[in-house]
Image (cartoon, grey):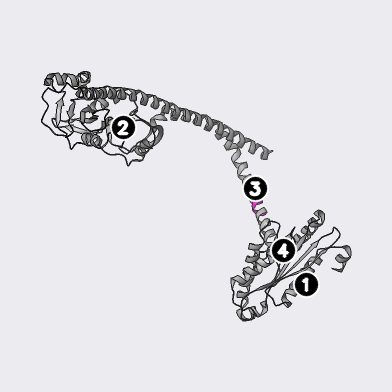
Amino acid sequence: MVTRLVPLGLIVAAATLLLGGAVLLDARHDAWARAEQASMNLAMAVERDITRSLAAYDLSLQGAAMAIEQPHLAASSPEIRQMAMFDRAAGARQFGTLLVLNAEGDVVASSAGPVPPSTNLAGRDVFRVHQARADLGLYIGHPDRAPAAPEDLRVPVSRRLPLHRSFFGGVVVGSLRLADFQELFARFDLGHRGSITLLRADGQLLARHPVSLPDIGRDFSAAEIVRRFMAAPAGSFPGIAPIDGVERLYTFRHLGDYPLILSVAIAVDDVYAAWWRKAAVIAGVLLLLCVATVALCVIARREIRQRLAAEAALVETAARFERLSQVDGLTGLANRAKFDAELALAWRHAARHRQPLSLVMLDADCFKGYNDRYGHQEGDRVLRAVAGCIKVAATRPEDTGARYGGEEFAVLLPGTGTSGAYAVAEKIRAAVAAAALPHLDSPCGRVTVSAGVALVWPEQDSAPGQLVAMADQALYAAKRGGRNRVEIGLSLAAAPDMAMSA
């Protein structure tokens, strides 16, 4: 009765824990999925705001570019030229001053006034990238500080002139205030350790909330999370921030055709905060339910485990002794008793299914002389080497390699014809010869084996001893024929009178 109650109690406790764990795991997955969805929605909303602002500013750049291409504009007064080129920029004053540079990099027009400053910007990247590439489109440069206001970080943006022709006529340049992005990001509540980050497509940090001014303009392309940002157009994954080391759920998007990446990150601890509170309550209830069951079962369980362990040890010991009783300790092959049992079993099977049964008998040539000259330990090494060759040659599960006695070995090959058995014997003989173990008392000068092959088609009332006798005769023929060779004996169908003579 106790043995029934203990498993029942453990099953009930385990089922309770599994059910509770499944509920908690499902709730954990739901919390993560909700956080992913919320992050994605927020990233899309912020993306719309940023791309809308960039599109408006890009229209201002394109408007200036298209206006400067007007054929009669050069003959107009400076005021008229400025109005024509920067009329579209009037609604985008928050983006900064627009400048038009000619093909040499000289400022030829400015939205700040009719008389442009005498400045050459040919060395700036916003000029050089368009000079090198005609297909670049809108270029967003590296963060820079205004000389008059070092705290006012800006990002230059530019477009090539003319817009739709292959030759290079200059660029139109403006700038974006990074503080505008910081103000946009600050509107959203992502928890006390959440963050929103805007990066260039090459991994350079442009804006972040919470703000980290020393990191603005820093290259984070070597960071693992940024590499993942750069490798896909959008996605979501957990990672550790290179700035503060906080583990967060990152949701990122590339902003349309602009070379920008937006990342919305929620601290993993914040994602699971509500789940942990729920898990604590559920876990407490589950523990209270399970402790009583486990406390009643612990003594009986310990006794059952001790009994099972003792029984398992006895079974293992018995199995080990059984295996040892069937294996030759020196060679690892089957011993004589195991061979006799396998021969009888294979004989009955072959007789029942009318299949051939082959046997290879092998003997190490001049082995007594080898022991006398080199010693028994070296002789044992030779026997192990021969056994290794037998294991390599007889690979089918039904094949049985055995040490028949002394330096004599046997290989039982059920369902194998004469040619197959001869091939196995020859493979063993060749492998032993190839080992090139020296043997000064052998005519060959090295360790060799001789083998005899015999085959019968057993009958139900016949005995297997005749197969061994036939293989032995073939072995002796190989010995008489000069050793280091394989001889094939007669192939016979067993008959009752043959069994009696055997």
Residue annotated with mark 3: 308
Q: Nearer the viewer, mark 4 or mark 3?
A: 4
Of the numbered discs 2 and 3, the one sitting upstream in the chain is 2
The three-letter amino acid code for the residue at tag 2 is Pro
Question: Image quadrant of residue 381?
Answer: bottom right
Instruction: Depth check: give the residue in front, 35 or 47.
Output: 47
Of the numbered discs 1 and 3, the one sitting upstream in the chain is 3
Q: Tag 4's secondary structure? A: helix
The numbered disc on residue 473 is 1
Instruction: Depth check: give the residue in front, 184 or 132.
Output: 132
Q: Is residue 241 above or below residue 320?
A: above
The numbered disc on residue 377 is none
Residue annotated with mark 2: 259
* Disc 4 to disc 2, C-alpha distance: 74 Å
**What span is colored magenta in the figure?**
310-314
Q: What residue is rendered at 87% in x and 63% in y?
A: 495
Of the numbered discs 2 and 1, the one sitting upstream in the chain is 2
Instruction: Depth check: give the residue in front, 101 or 41.
Output: 101
Q: Nearer the viewer, mark 2 or mark 3?
A: 2
Of the numbered discs 4 and 2, the one sitting upstream in the chain is 2
* Disc 2 to disc 3, C-alpha distance: 67 Å
The three-letter amino acid code for the residue at tag 1 is Gln
Q: Is residue 216 visible?
A: no
The three-letter amino acid code for the residue at tag 3 is Leu
* Disc 1 to disc 3, C-alpha distance: 53 Å
